[in-house]
Amino acid sequence: MVRAEIDRLMRKLYAAKARGDLNEVCQLFGDDAEIRITGANPRNPLGVTASGAGEVRPLLALLIKAFRTSDLSVISILIDGPKVAVHWRANIQSRITGATVPTELIDLVEVRGGHIVRFNEFFASR
């Protein structure tokens, strides 16, 4: 993929996340994708992994069902071949507790064949 295609793919991902569109988010991940999500909250650290379509889709479904993303803003997208770093921020609301937390996120992504194959997300409350 060329740089412009990767940029479009990533922007499509964040737009789908902001809408809570599970089907579109899942279509952007390859069948063999790996996801790692790590939270840097000292009171409630989080570490989640999923590998392959059988684990990735249920994880994404859980995240979209449990959390609402609003005021999403992509700060920067750095593309180096198939590797991408995205710095973004959003307000993340728990659909369970109702609490909203302003959050800073960094995603390290690898793209192959028009799909996301590795997705590492690091986040911390602002």
Image (cartoon, rainbow, N blue to C red):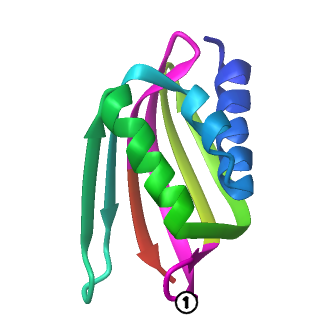
Q: Nearer the viewer, residue 41 or 67?
A: 67
Q: Nearer the viewer, residue 74 or 115?
A: 115
The relative height of residue 82 versus residue 96 in the rendered view (above or below) is: above
Q: Residue at x 67, y 54 (%)?
A: 20
- Pinpoint residue 1: horizontal percent, then vertical percent: 61, 11
- Pinpoint residue 120: horizontal percent, then vertical percent: 37, 45
The relative height of residue 77 versus residue 117 in the rendered view (above or below) is: below
List the residue tagged with mark 1. Answer: 99
The relative height of residue 74 versus residue 94 in the rendered view (above or below) is: above
Q: Residue at x 65, y 40 (%)?
A: 13
Amino acid on which the number 1 mark rests in the picture: Ala
The relative height of residue 91 versus residue 76 in the rendered view (above or below) is: below
Does the magenta run of residues contain 110? Answer: yes
Task: Please indicate whether residue 29 sits to the left or right of residue 69 in the image.
Answer: left
Q: Residue at x 29, y 41 (%)?
A: 50
Q: Residue at x 50, y 81 (%)?
A: 96
Does the magenta run of residues contain 111? Answer: yes
Classified by dominant secondary structure, the portion drawn in magenta counts as: strand
The magenta segment: 91-120
Task: Please indicate whether residue 29 sits to the left or right of residue 74 in the image.
Answer: left
Q: How many residues crowd mark 1 within 10 Å: few (<14), some (14–19), many (20+)?
A: few
Can you tell which quarter of the image residue 72 is in?
bottom right
Task: Please indicate whether residue 4 sits to the left or right of residue 2 in the image.
Answer: right
